[in-house]
Amino acid sequence: MYQDKTLICKDCGQEFVFTAGEQEFYAEKGFANEPTRCKACRSARKAERNSDRPARQMFDAVCAECGAPTQVPFEPTSGRPVYCRDCFRRHQNH
C-alpha cells in the first residue's frame, strides 16, 4: 500500500527516506502532512526546544509504603502519603 518516498529536508537540504512504515504510522496517528525535516534535524530541533525549558524542581521524600528515600516533582504536604516509583505503580494497578 505504502512505498518509500525520498524527501528533501527543509533545514539541511539533504535527501531522506520517508519509509512505508513511517507513512503507515503517520496515517494511523491521523497526521496529514509528511515530515519536512530529516531525523537528525528533527532531533536537533527537539533538543533545542527542550533546552529552553527550566529543569523540573524535585523534592526529597520518604516512601510511605516501603520507607525508601525518593524524589517527587511536587512539594509533599503533611498528612498525604508519598510513594516511590515502584510503590506508586503498584497502587495504580489496584
Image: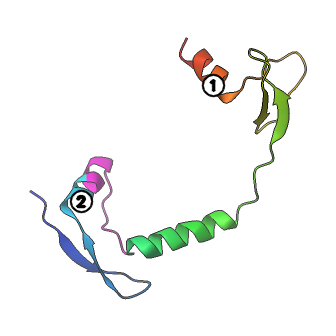
Residue 21 is a magenta residue: no
Quarter of the figure that contains the N terminus: bottom left
Residue mark closest to the camera, 1 vs 2: 1
Q: Where is residue 5 in the image (x, y as percent from the top left)?
A: 19, 72
Q: Which residue is drawn at 80% across and 43% down?
A: 58
Which residue is the extreme one toward the right?
78
Q: Which residue is drawn at 88% across and 25% down?
A: 77
Splitting the image into 4 quarters, where does residue 76 fall? top right
- Looking at the picture, tell me which residue is in the foreground, 15 or 86: 86
Q: Where is residue 32 in the image (x, y as percent from the top left)?
A: 30, 60
Could you say which disc has been placed on residue 86 in the image? 1
Kind of residue at badge 1:
Asp
The span picked out in magenta is 25-37
Splitting the image into 4 quarters, where does residue 72 fall? top right
Q: Mark 2 points at which residue?
A: 23
- Looking at the picture, tell me which residue is in the foreground, 27 or 82: 82
Q: Position of residue 57 (x, y in %)?
A: 81, 47
User: In this picture, is 10 found above or below 71?
Assistant: below
Q: Is the magenta stretch mostly helix, strand or loop?
A: loop
Which residue is the extreme one toward the left?
1
Disc 2 residue crowd, few under 14, some 14–19, many 20+, Cα 10 Å: many
Q: Where is residue 59 in the image (x, y as percent from the top left)?
A: 84, 38
Kind of residue at badge 2:
Gln
Numbered disc 2: secondary structure: helix
